[in-house]
Image (cartoon, rainbow, N blue to C red):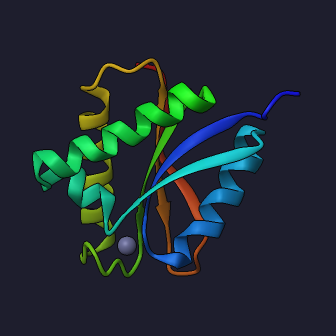
């Protein structure tokens, strides 16, 4: 029996972002499951975190690809982020820069940037695009 189809999301640990992003990804990409890597403000970490923090995220992306065949990785920024405080334009800029970091890993995945706004609805801000 097939285990289902998967995509990968690098999301904030903020519980308010989890369900909306999971549902949005499953609906928009018609997949069964969303592997979720969480950090406090992952867009900020990818832009200015330590090498250890960034390679920990990369390891989990690779695990999702290897174990579940994911070929799409989304990076999330959101309203009222405690781990990475800042206005929407800063958050979105950091999502785009974070996607550049992921792109530099040279993985065979499509990349997508997401914004979760103050009503906890999800919008695509960049992608999905192939490498
Ligand atoms: Zn957050």
Q: Is residue 25 left or right of residue 8?
A: right
Across and down, in percent, residue 128 comes to: 52, 33
- Residue 86, position as x, y percentages in the image: 24, 75
Using the image as rendered, state which of residue 20 and residue 121 is in the foreground: 20
Instruction: Tell me: 75 left or right of 57.
Output: right
Q: Is residue 73 above or below residue 23?
A: above
For the image, the number of numbered tags is 0
Question: Is residue 39 positioned above or below 119 on the image?
Answer: above
Residue 26 rendering spot, x and y as whole percentages: 73, 48
Observer-nearest of 34 and 127 = 34
Q: Which quadrant is the C terminus positioned in?
A: top left
Q: Is residue 32 left or right of residue 49?
A: right
Q: Residue at x 32, y 69 (%)?
A: 40
Q: Residue furthest right?
A: 1
Query: Relative to 48, does residue 83 appear above or below in the rendering?
Result: below
The quarter of the picture where the N terminus appears is top right
What residue lies at 73% left-to-right and 33% top-to-bottom?
5
Residue at 42% across / 37% down in the picture?
A: 61
Q: Which residue is at 31% across, 19% downward?
A: 106
Give the quadrant of residue 97.
Answer: top left
Quadrant where ligand 1 appears: bottom left
Foreground residue among 120 and 101: 101
**Quadrant of res 29:** top right
In the visual, does 69 lie left or right of 4? left
């Amino acid at each position: 029996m097939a285990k289902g189809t998967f995509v990968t999301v690098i999301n904030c640990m903020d519980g308010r972002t989890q369900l909306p992003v999971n549902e949005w990804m499953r609906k928009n990409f018609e997949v069964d499951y969303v592997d979720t890597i969480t950090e406090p403000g992952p867009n900020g970490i990818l832009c200015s975190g330590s090498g250890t923090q960034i390679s920990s995220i990369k390891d989990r992306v690779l695990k999702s690809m290897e174990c579940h065949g994911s070929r799409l990785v989304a990076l999330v920024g959101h309203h009222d982020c405690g781990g990475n405080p800042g206005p929407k334009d800063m958050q979105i800029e950091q999502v785009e820069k974070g996607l550049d970091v992921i792109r530099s890993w040279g993985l065979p995945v499509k990349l997508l940037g997401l914004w979760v706004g103050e009503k906890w609805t999800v919008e695509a801000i960049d992608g999905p695009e192939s490498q």
